[in-house]
Amino acid sequence: MKKAVHVVGAVIENKEGQILAALRGPEMSLANYWEFPGGKIEAGETKQEALKREILEELGCVIEVFSPVEDTTYEYEKVVVRLETFMAKVIEGVPKVSEHAELKWVPKDKLYSLNWAPADIPAIEKLSKQSHKI
Protein backbone atom coordinates (compact mmCIF):
# COMPACT_ATOMS: atom_id res chain seq x y z
CA MET A 1 0.00 0.00 0.00
CA LYS A 2 1.21 3.49 -0.79
CA LYS A 3 2.10 5.91 1.94
CA ALA A 4 -0.58 8.56 2.52
CA VAL A 5 0.52 12.12 3.26
CA HIS A 6 -1.73 14.98 4.39
CA VAL A 7 -0.31 18.39 3.48
CA VAL A 8 -1.47 21.99 3.40
CA GLY A 9 -0.65 24.62 0.80
CA ALA A 10 -0.89 28.41 0.95
CA VAL A 11 -2.41 30.30 -1.95
CA ILE A 12 -0.67 33.55 -1.05
CA GLU A 13 -2.11 36.55 -2.85
CA ASN A 14 -0.45 39.98 -2.98
CA LYS A 15 -2.05 43.42 -3.32
CA GLU A 16 -1.85 43.17 -7.12
CA GLY A 17 -3.90 39.97 -7.08
CA GLN A 18 -0.92 37.80 -8.02
CA ILE A 19 -0.39 34.34 -6.53
CA LEU A 20 2.92 33.10 -5.13
CA ALA A 21 4.21 29.98 -6.89
CA ALA A 22 7.18 27.95 -5.63
CA LEU A 23 9.38 25.83 -7.91
CA ARG A 24 10.50 22.50 -6.47
CA GLY A 25 14.25 22.08 -6.71
CA PRO A 26 16.08 19.31 -8.58
CA GLU A 27 16.80 17.42 -5.33
CA MET A 28 13.14 17.37 -4.23
CA SER A 29 10.54 14.77 -5.18
CA LEU A 30 8.45 16.12 -8.08
CA ALA A 31 11.47 18.19 -9.12
CA ASN A 32 10.85 21.16 -11.39
CA TYR A 33 7.12 21.28 -10.72
CA TRP A 34 5.53 24.45 -9.40
CA GLU A 35 3.45 24.24 -6.24
CA PHE A 36 1.77 26.27 -3.54
CA PRO A 37 4.22 26.50 -0.63
CA GLY A 38 3.33 24.56 2.50
CA GLY A 39 3.95 21.14 3.94
CA LYS A 40 2.95 18.34 6.29
CA ILE A 41 0.66 18.81 9.26
CA GLU A 42 2.45 17.80 12.48
CA ALA A 43 0.65 15.95 15.30
CA GLY A 44 -1.52 18.27 17.36
CA GLU A 45 -1.50 21.12 14.83
CA THR A 46 -4.51 22.60 13.09
CA LYS A 47 -4.22 22.98 9.31
CA GLN A 48 -3.87 26.74 9.74
CA GLU A 49 -1.11 26.37 12.37
CA ALA A 50 0.76 23.94 10.13
CA LEU A 51 0.54 26.35 7.22
CA LYS A 52 1.82 29.31 9.25
CA ARG A 53 4.73 27.23 10.59
CA GLU A 54 5.67 25.80 7.19
CA ILE A 55 5.59 29.21 5.49
CA LEU A 56 7.74 30.71 8.26
CA GLU A 57 10.22 27.80 7.85
CA GLU A 58 10.19 27.72 4.03
CA LEU A 59 9.78 31.38 3.10
CA GLY A 60 10.79 33.27 6.25
CA CYS A 61 7.59 35.30 6.46
CA VAL A 62 4.40 35.39 8.51
CA ILE A 63 1.05 34.79 6.84
CA GLU A 64 -2.57 35.15 7.77
CA VAL A 65 -4.65 32.14 6.68
CA PHE A 66 -8.15 32.63 5.26
CA SER A 67 -10.78 30.42 3.65
CA PRO A 68 -10.14 26.98 2.13
CA VAL A 69 -9.65 26.86 -1.65
CA GLU A 70 -9.61 23.15 -2.50
CA ASP A 71 -9.22 19.71 -0.94
CA THR A 72 -7.60 17.29 -3.37
CA THR A 73 -6.33 13.74 -3.08
CA TYR A 74 -3.86 12.74 -5.78
CA GLU A 75 -2.17 9.40 -6.23
CA TYR A 76 1.46 9.74 -7.31
CA GLU A 77 3.72 6.83 -8.20
CA LYS A 78 4.95 6.24 -4.63
CA VAL A 79 2.61 8.21 -2.40
CA VAL A 80 -1.00 9.36 -2.04
CA VAL A 81 -1.16 13.06 -1.23
CA ARG A 82 -4.12 14.86 0.27
CA LEU A 83 -3.55 18.57 -0.32
CA GLU A 84 -5.73 21.18 1.33
CA THR A 85 -5.11 24.69 0.06
CA PHE A 86 -6.09 27.93 1.79
CA MET A 87 -6.10 31.55 0.71
CA ALA A 88 -3.47 33.54 2.59
CA LYS A 89 -1.59 36.82 2.63
CA VAL A 90 1.80 37.88 3.93
CA ILE A 91 1.45 40.07 7.03
CA GLU A 92 5.12 40.25 8.02
CA GLY A 93 8.34 39.88 6.04
CA VAL A 94 8.98 39.08 2.38
CA PRO A 95 8.96 35.52 0.96
CA LYS A 96 12.53 34.31 0.35
CA VAL A 97 13.81 31.20 -1.39
CA SER A 98 15.25 28.59 0.97
CA GLU A 99 13.92 25.12 0.14
CA HIS A 100 12.61 25.90 -3.34
CA ALA A 101 14.59 26.66 -6.49
CA GLU A 102 12.57 29.78 -7.28
CA LEU A 103 9.59 31.86 -6.16
CA LYS A 104 7.42 33.77 -8.60
CA TRP A 105 4.38 36.08 -8.30
CA VAL A 106 1.97 35.07 -11.05
CA PRO A 107 -1.23 36.85 -12.19
CA LYS A 108 -4.25 34.54 -11.75
CA ASP A 109 -4.91 34.45 -15.49
CA LYS A 110 -1.30 33.27 -16.12
CA LEU A 111 -1.26 30.42 -13.59
CA TYR A 112 -1.72 27.84 -16.35
CA SER A 113 1.57 28.97 -17.96
CA LEU A 114 3.50 27.10 -15.23
CA ASN A 115 4.06 23.35 -14.95
CA TRP A 116 2.18 22.65 -11.70
CA ALA A 117 2.38 19.51 -9.58
CA PRO A 118 -0.75 17.46 -10.35
CA ALA A 119 -2.19 17.76 -6.82
CA ASP A 120 -2.12 21.58 -7.13
CA ILE A 121 -4.06 21.74 -10.41
CA PRO A 122 -7.63 21.53 -8.99
CA ALA A 123 -6.87 24.62 -6.87
CA ILE A 124 -5.52 26.40 -9.97
CA GLU A 125 -8.75 25.58 -11.80
CA LYS A 126 -10.78 27.08 -8.93
CA LEU A 127 -8.63 30.22 -8.80
CA SER A 128 -8.87 30.69 -12.56
CA LYS A 129 -12.66 30.50 -12.40
CA GLN A 130 -12.74 33.00 -9.52
CA SER A 131 -10.59 35.48 -11.40
CA HIS A 132 -13.11 35.51 -14.24
CA LYS A 133 -16.03 36.41 -12.01
CA ILE A 134 -17.39 39.88 -12.59
Image: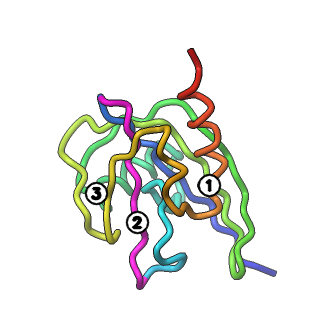
Q: Name the residue under label 2.
A: 23
Which residue corresponds to the image point at 69% horizontal and 82% vertical from the top-left?
Answer: 78
Q: What element carries label 2?
A: strand
Q: In this view, does 4 lie to the left or right of 92?
A: right
- Magenta region includes residue 100: no
Q: In which quarter of the image is the C terminus?
A: top right
Label located before the other in sequence (3 or 1): 3
Q: How far is mark 3 from mark 1, CA to CA?
A: 19 Å
Which residue corresponds to the image point at 29% horizontal and 29% vertical from the top-left?
Answer: 15
Q: How far is mark 2 from mark 1, CA to CA?
A: 17 Å
Give the residue type at disc 2. Answer: Leu
Furthest residue in direction bottom, as rendered: 27
Q: In this view, does 21 lie to the left or right of 56?
A: right
Q: Name the residue under label 1.
A: 83
Q: Can residue 111 be seen in this view?
A: yes
- Image spot of residue 65 (x, y percent): 43, 36
Q: How far is mark 2 from mark 3, CA to CA?
A: 12 Å
Tell which tag, 2 or 3, sits nearer the viewer. 2
Q: Name the residue under label 3.
A: 59
Q: How crowded is mark 1: few (under 14 residues within 10 Å), some or many (20 or more)?
A: many
Q: Quadrant of the N terminus?
A: bottom right
Start-end of magenta stretch: 16-27
Q: How crowded is mark 3: few (under 14 residues within 10 Å), some or many (20 or more)?
A: many
Find out whether the residues at labels 2 and 3 contact each other: C-beta distance under 8 Å: no
Label located before the other in sequence (2 or 1): 2
- Image spot of residue 10 (x, y percent): 46, 47
Tell which tag, 2 or 1, sits nearer the viewer. 2
Which residue corresponds to the image point at 64% horizontal and 42% vertical from the top-left?
Answer: 125
Give the residue type at disc 3. Answer: Leu
Give the residue type at disc 1. Answer: Leu
